[in-house]
Amino acid sequence: MSIQKDATTNSIALSPPEQQFGMNPVKQRETDNYAQEYIKGFVDKWDELIDWDSRAESEGDFFIQALRKHNVRKVLDVATGTGFHSVRLLEAGFEVVSADGSPEMLVKAFANASHRGHILRTVQADWRWLNRDVHGEYDAIICLGNSFTHMFEERDRRKALAEYYAMLKHDGILILDQRNYDRILDDGFSSKHTYYYCGDNVRAAPEHIDDGLARFRYDFPDESSYYLNMFPLRKNYVRRLMQEVGFQNIETFGDFQETYRDEEPDFYIHVAEKS
Ligand code: SAM
């Protein structure tokens, strides 16, 4: 938040907060960054970026089917964002608790849900300390929309996965997705711009890629731009971490399909069982 003085009226106005990446943005590689990246201006634009109707059409009932296949009733959405999956799952009849580390996101999710006639049960919680802030056991945990990419340290990823594991019932499942960073790291970026980032007129493209950073820029029609600094997770690395934390029978889908060629999908979806 910055303070600006209007010279004509002599009044003081608070300008909205801006993203803070400092003088050298590609040096910002910390797990805690997400809190300042999802400022109100960006959050308000987020739904423009992920257009709910086209997104629902793209993913069909993939997640609903996966949850039903595992007899899931109670779901913890740990990366609620603006509430897209929490609302879809509520409407499909699941019991949902909606967590996120960003209060801005939860406020927006709550408003989005109430416009659709639902009361979201929201909890502000960072994944690294999930069990401290969220109570109960769940049949499923979902971490969707390329959210896990926000963790820059391996110990944070392990801690988050262990926290998810602990919150699941003995036969629970974790569904976690990620962008296909293998392709970006190995071959450069070329998204079909279909899944997740479905909003019209919104350009999402990487501005910097190396083994430790994928810095994406999001350009909106009103000429505003926002950035996310993310860790480029390789698919097999994520699978290995899940396994090492204790998850079993990890199935990986490419763009909601059971079979994929490694270079094809934009996104991978891992479905892992606790036991
Ligand atoms: N799942 C939503 C979707 O698909 O639209 C939101 C995706 S958004 C890319 C990532 C979300 O993860 C943000 O809402 C952010 O606040 C949350 N997040 C990132 N790191 C987190 C952490 N360490 N603990 C809790 N939430 C986190």
Image (tube, grey):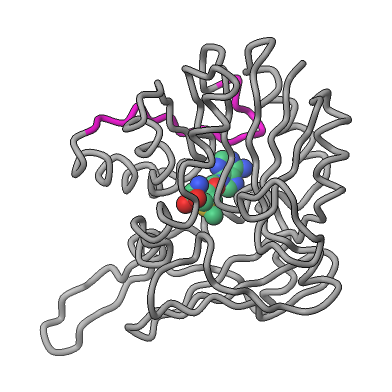
Who is closer to the viewer here, 92 or 44? Answer: 92
Quarter holding the N terminus?
bottom left
Does residue 178 sit above or below 275 in this rendering? Answer: below
Residue 155 appears in which quarter of the rendering? top right
Residue 24 appears in which quarter of the rendering? bottom right
Who is closer to the viewer here, 47 or 63? Answer: 63
Judged left or right of residue 189, residue 17 is left
Q: Residue at x 76, y 37 (%)?
A: 251
Q: Residue at x 43, y 60 (%)?
A: 39
Q: Residue at x 39, y 59 (%)?
A: 43
Magenta stretch containing residue 123, yes or no? yes
Q: Position of residue 195 (x, y in %)?
A: 53, 62
Is residue 35 visible in the rendered image? The answer is no
Q: Position of residue 29 (x, y in %)?
A: 73, 61
Does residue 183 sit above or below 115 in this rendering? Answer: below
Q: Residue at x 71, y 22 (%)?
A: 165
Is residue 154 visible in the rendered image? The answer is yes
Does residue 47 sit above or below 114 in this rendering? Answer: below
Quarter holding the C terminus?
top right
Magenta stretch containing residue 83, yes or no? no
Q: Position of residue 258 (x, y in %)?
A: 70, 46
* Number of marks present in the image shown: 0
In the rendered structure, which segment of residues is drawn in magenta?
A: 118-132
Q: Position of residue 211 (x, y in %)?
A: 85, 67
Residue furthest to the front:
259
Judged left or right of residue 208, residue 202 is left
Who is closer to the viewer here, 148 or 57? Answer: 57
Residue furthest to the left:
9
